Image: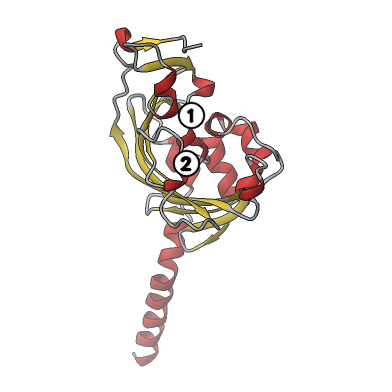
Amino acid sequence: MKIMITTLTAAVAVLISSAPAQAAAKNPVAALKAQLVAGHGVRFTDTSAFVGSINKDPLVVRTGKVRFGKKGLTGWDITGKFPSPLYDGHNTTPERTIAIGDVAWVTGGDLSEELPKGKTWFKTYSKMNLTTMSSWFGQVVSPAEPATLAALVKNGKLSGSTYRGKITFSQLFKISPWFSSSIPMRSDTEATITYALKVDGKGLPSRLTTSWQATDFLDISWWEGKAVTTDTRYTGWGSKVSIKSPPANQVTTELKD
């Protein structure tokens, strides 16, 4: 009897100790693909900092939601705010981008000063939908894209429920519309992003932190040695997401001369 109890105790201990590893081992890509239901999506918030700057305030704070189709992202609505005094000299009204398929609408920020009277939105191609100042320093990696998530999992080393690794700008450019829309111009295509991706009990992304050198985007002398770090939280996986275009009478496709 004593031997039996000892054996059972040891077996229970093994099961308990292995449970977290089993939970973390769930396939994140399969979990994400199960979420690709038309009209549903996920919400996120991210906060970016300019590490190495004398200013310690967040550089950009963004909130947004993305909508899925059967194959991936079909639209998003993102608002970026600028709490940092590093933006002195720029129009710091919040920027907002709405994208549906191949079309996008942008408002706020420096763009506000370029719009004709009576118009508040600029219509453009979706390829350029995130090229606002807040997007340059927002989260440039999207684990809501199946191909991107697969690359993060493959390149990362799993510890508990977190994948840690590195991925290059050029790798992301080949697989991620989100990345190529965020920073289509960059001074170093081989630049590296260091990341930590945490998944929840279902295997879905819950938190992503990234870091990359600021001069990899633009080679500006006072950016030397500084890094852009972004902390993004994902919530509401599978919830219904509605994304609508702005009123037509507020939209223009032309800017002031």
Crowding at dot 2, Cα within 10 Å, few <14 / some 14-19 / many 20+, comes out as many
Viewer-nearest residue: 248 or 74 = 248
**In which quadrant of the rendered view does residue 99 lie?**
top left
Q: Which residue is mark 1?
A: 130
The residue that appears at 31% across and 11% down in the rendered structure is 118
Rendered position, 219 above or below 132: below
Callout 2 secondary element: loop
Percent x, y of residue 88: 45, 41
Sequence-earlier tag: 1 or 2: 1
Write down the residue under mark 2.
Answer: 138
Residue kind at label 2, given as amino acid type: Gly
- Say left or right for 128 vs 92: right
Instruction: Name the one closer to the observer, 224 or 2.
Output: 224
Q: Position of residue 240 (x, y in %)?
A: 28, 30
Foreground residue among 245 and 17: 245
Amino acid type, mark 1 = Leu
Coordinates of residue 249 in the picture (x, y in percent): 30, 7
Q: Residues within 10 Å of mark 1 (few under 14, many from 20)?
A: many
Query: Which quadrant of the figure contains the N terminus?
Result: bottom left
In the displayed structure image, the side of residue 142 where residue 249 appears, left or right: left
Is the residue under label 2 in contact with that under label 1 (CB below 8 Å)? yes
Residue 208 in sight from this viewpoint: yes
**Direction from residue 112 to residue 165 in the image, left or right:** right
Q: What is the x, y in percent for residue 189? A: 70, 38
